[in-house]
Image (cartoon, helix red, strand yellow):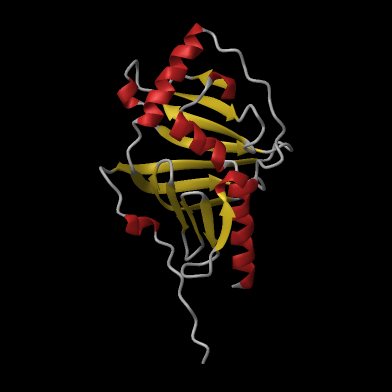
């Protein structure tokens, strides 16, 4: 059990801090076509509904993990790992990491994690100066972001589905965090269910106190 807790702590910290040491990248100049796509991405992010489903995670060491999630962008996220594993909950300005369900949470400021870049993009929109790369593919596209001031740590590459010319078919389905050593952590969403609203209970941090006797 101790080994499992240590493994989960390392896994969770890989999600949160994998890009902390990333150095600032130069923003890629956006052409007219990229500018059109950036506007489309910002509209997609602004319109994202609350969602739930399954996730798969690829770790820097080549390992994999999976579990269920609930997301109400940009302020509330919850990832619960399979097999009685840990839970990562983002509420407001803080991240709570529980190494097992009901365990004592360890708290971290979101501002110290690469999640801050992702949340800024969703809450405030993506400015051209944040974009370091844009790649258009047949059925999806991706955009790579970094805070140009360097105040928010890390880089985030966002992946979207692409459905013809209709923006309504676009959906954020994965993101990749890369650190200065080119170590990659990727999270991919599946079985996506959208909601009009997610109850606050989805993001409750439940801590079970152990009896002293």
The one nearer the camera, 30 or 62, is 30
Residue 109 location (% of width, % of height): 58, 51
The quadrant holding residue 4 is bottom right
Q: Residue furthest top?
A: 32
Please give the name of the residue rendered at 72% of the width and 36% of the height, measured from the top-left corner: 180
100 is higher (above) or lower (below) than 186: below
The quadrant holding residue 146 is top right
177 is higher (above) or lower (below) than 12: above
Left or right: residue 98 versus residue 49 is right
Left or right: residue 114 versus residue 77 is right
The quadrant holding residue 40 is top left
Name the image quarter holding the N terminus. Answer: bottom right
Please give the name of the residue rendered at 39% of the width and 56% of the height, measured from the top-left corner: 203
Left or right: residue 152 versus residue 180 is left
Residue 105 in view (yes/no) = yes
Residue 30 location (% of width, % of height): 56, 12
Residue 182 location (% of width, % of height): 70, 36
10 is higher (above) or lower (below) than 134: below
The one nearer the camera, 86 or 150, is 150
The one nearer the camera, 27 or 94, is 94
Left or right: residue 164 versus residue 128 is left
Residue 163 location (% of width, % of height): 35, 22
Q: Residue furthest left?
A: 196
Residue 62 in view (yes/no) = no
Please give the name of the residue rendered at 48% of the width and 19% of the height, measured from the top-left corner: 137
Please give the name of the residue rendered at 41% of the width and 51% of the height, measured from the top-left corner: 69
Total count of labels: 0
């Amino acid at each position: 059990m101790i080994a499992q807790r240590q493994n989960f702590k390392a896994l969770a910290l890989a999600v949160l801090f994998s890009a902390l040491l990333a150095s600032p990248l130069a923003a890629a100049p956006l052409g007219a076509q990229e500018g059109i796509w950036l506007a489309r991405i910002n509209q997609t992010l602004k319109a994202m509904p609350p969602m739930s489903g399954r996730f798969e995670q690829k770790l820097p060491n080549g390992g994999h993990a999976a579990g269920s999630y609930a997301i109400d962008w940009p302020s509330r996220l919850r990832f619960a790992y399979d097999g009685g594993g840990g839970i990562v909950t983002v509420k407001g300005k803080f991240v709570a990491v529980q190494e097992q369900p009901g365990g004592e949470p360890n708290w971290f400021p979101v501002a110290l994690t690469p999640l801050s870049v992702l949340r800024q993009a969703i809450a405030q929109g993506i400015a051209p100066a944040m974009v370091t790369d844009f790649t258009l593919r047949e059925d999806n596209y991706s955009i790579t972001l970094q805070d140009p001031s360097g105040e928010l740590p890390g880089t985030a590459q966002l992946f979207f589905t692409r459905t013809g010319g209709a923006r309504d078919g676009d959906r954020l389905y994965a993101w990749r965090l890369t650190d200065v050593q080119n170590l990659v952590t990727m999270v991919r969403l599946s079985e996506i269910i959208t909601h009009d609203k997610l109850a606050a209970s989805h993001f409750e941090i439940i801590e079970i106190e152990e009896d002293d006797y």
